[in-house]
Amino acid sequence: MSGGLPLIVTRPEPGNSATIARATALGLDAYAMPLFAAQAIAWTAPPQAEFDALLLTSAQAVRLAGPQLARLAALPVYAVGTATAEAAQAAGLRVVKTGAADAQSLVDAMTPEENARILWLCGRDRSELDPRGAALEPLACYAVDALEPPRDWSKRIATPAVLLAHSARAAQRLAELVGSLRSHLALVAISPAVAAAAGDGWAELATAAQPSDASMLALAHALCHKGDK
């Protein structure tokens, strides 16, 4: 077993296993505790001529979109985070910009003059975005449903640990599930918006410099070993 505080990873698969592997490679004592599961839902791609750009805020959209995604391949893609951009490129899409912060920051950079009509391929449950004067049309191609906490959940959060929040919805659910126990738990959020969704009262609340696993795990590593001498 590695030293330091345990790390609890709650994101859906396949991201959970990927994060666990990266955390283990860093020497962290990581536990897979998925609280959500992602699945494809039926959708129909609109005519791509009706839009100027495609916004992707999660790699899940690419992974679960299915064959309909190919009908949008001519649209320039704006992706949040390197994982989303890499998934889009692997699917044959043309990524023109990768946002290094959150989704709103990327939308802010998509000026209405260049992208007056934006198609946002997203999940059924999503945060609100200010289109900044553009016509932003969300289209859900997948759903992320809550799961019952794993069997060892209560045991893992009963003592100090570090948790990861990869979305605002995850941060909100974590806050609800841990309740007052958050006073001895540290939380690493993927963005400022996710950190805000987590609320106050955590032993530590840290925000990743970039919306990536690498940035989150660097913070997690520091928090897990904060008390080491």
Image: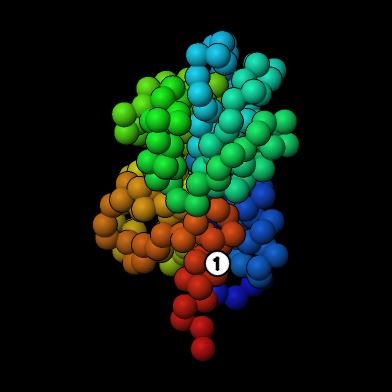
Quadrant of the rendering where the N terminus is positioned: bottom right
Q: Residues within 10 Å of mark 1 (few under 14, many from 20)?
A: some
Residue 197, given in percent of the width and then of the height, sits at 32, 46
Residue at 55%, 53% in the rendered image: 212
Rendered position, 141 above or below 174: above
Mark 1 lies on a secondary structure that is helix
Residue at 52%, 59% in the rendered image: 216
- Residue corresponding to mark 1: 218
Quadrant in the picture for residue 94: top right
Residue 186, given in percent of the width and then of the height, sits at 41, 63
- Horizontal side of 40 relative to 220 (left or right) equals right
* Residue at the farthest front position: 113
Residue at 46%, 81% in the rendered image: 227
Q: Nearer the viewer, residue 26 or 201?
A: 26
Residue at 69%, 56% in the rendered image: 21
Rendered position, 97 above or below 225: above
Q: Nearer the viewer, residue 224 or 101?
A: 101
- Horizontal side of 140 relative to 82 (left or right) equals left
Quadrant in the picture for residue 185: bottom left
Residue type, numbered disc 1:
Ala
Question: In the rendered image, is residue 163 in sight?
Answer: no
Rendered position, 96 above or below 72: below
Residue 131, given in percent of the width and then of the height, sits at 35, 31
